[in-house]
Image (tube, grey):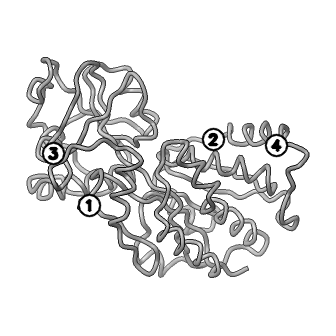
Amino acid sequence: MKWKHLTSLAICSLMISSCSRPTEKRQNADAAGIILQGTSSSSIAIAYWQWFSQLAIDNNINGDLQVMGSGESMRRFLSGAIDFAGTDTAPTSNQFQTAKRGILAFPVTARAIAIAYNYPGCKLQLTRQQLADIFLGKIRDFVELGCERKPIQVLHRESPSGTTATFTATLSAFSESWRHGPGAGLKVNWPTGKPVADSEAMIQTLSNTPGSLGYVEAAYVGKPLSTAALASRSGVFLQPTSRETARALSTIQLDERLLGQNPDPKTGYPIVSLAWVLIPRQPEQTKGEALRISVSYMLSQSGQDDAERLGYAPLPEVILTRSKQQLNQIQH
């Protein structure tokens, strides 16, 4: 599995730590100097970058973060090679049962998946069927969507991806042809399009390819790209704003493990998903308190504000409350 190492995380943490004000106090001295080894999907990595930059200032807890696909990330977590795994794909029941140290899954933020495209002057409003038909290869030119003529270059993720799982689950809810064709999953057989490696590669390729269109976290999208307005279940065309993402998140019902998704919410922007941090229920003795402090910060108002400033969606209070309650289940 291809992955990259965010060495700049450590640099960023050191730079911020060196500029901390004298009034800032380090808390929980027993956690001082701890290094937590972890992973993240590319879609949420910048949130973990920011969280551990702040944890380095306040608590001297440093995150050594590797960015990789969900499958490899889970394999490393289950093997005990890492202390935590940031994922946008929920663990399976079998993984919960076979994890030697157990698994606690904490929802920590959420994201909207945008339909991003590179065609200045074209304002897309896509129906549910049009969105599916683009990725089925049935719609091939922007003129079919009400814009000036230009061929559509569809882009999709190459390796197994939680973003792909969320997006294809929504396509399956939107379209019977998609549901009985490519279907939903971390990786599917795409009927059309060009593969790209990850979220960063998606943005780069979109930005460099006039006429391209793909799916990517709304937090990543900026000029020269635009985002399509998508039809909700009620037929209203919505952009992936924080407000509409929050409305959709309010429809997600969590199970006893704090897992849950809704690929076709009744209200709000239609393509949203939670992101979890996974930690062992029984972590290494020297890491337990540092993990509790870290997750507690992610769930705090400051941690949620960090994520929102980066373009992610803050969690509804009902989800935050249940996540915070689960902190008591960490055995250390």
The tag earlier along the polypeptide, 3 or 1, is 3
Q: Residue at x 69, y 66 (%)?
A: 291
Mark 2 vs mark 3, CA separation in Å: 35 Å
The answer to whether residue 238 is left or right of residue 132 is right
Crowd around label 4: few <14 · some 14–19 · many ≥20 (10 Å)? some
Depth check, front residue: 92 or 105? 105
Mark 3 vs mark 4, CA separation in Å: 47 Å
Mark 3 vs mark 1, CA separation in Å: 17 Å
Q: Residue at x 15, y 25 (%)?
A: 142
Q: Amino acid at mark 1?
A: Pro
Q: Which residue bears the numbered disc 4?
A: 17
Q: Amino acid at mark 4?
A: Ser
Residue 253 visible? The answer is: yes
The answer to whether residue 47 is left or right of residue 223 is right
Q: Amino acid at mark 2?
A: Leu
Q: Quadrant of residue 127?
A: top left
Foreground disc of the pair 1, 2: 1
Q: Which residue bears the numbered disc 3?
A: 132
Q: Position of residue 33 (x, y in %)?
A: 84, 57
Measured along the vertical axis of the image, is residue 324 above or below residue 124? below
Q: Which residue bears the numbered disc 2?
A: 6
Q: Secondary structure at mark 3?
A: helix
Q: Secondary structure at mark 1?
A: loop
Q: Amino acid at mark 3?
A: Ala
- Numbered tag placed on residue 151 in the rendering: none
Q: Secondary structure at mark 4?
A: helix
Mark 1 vs mark 2, CA separation in Å: 34 Å
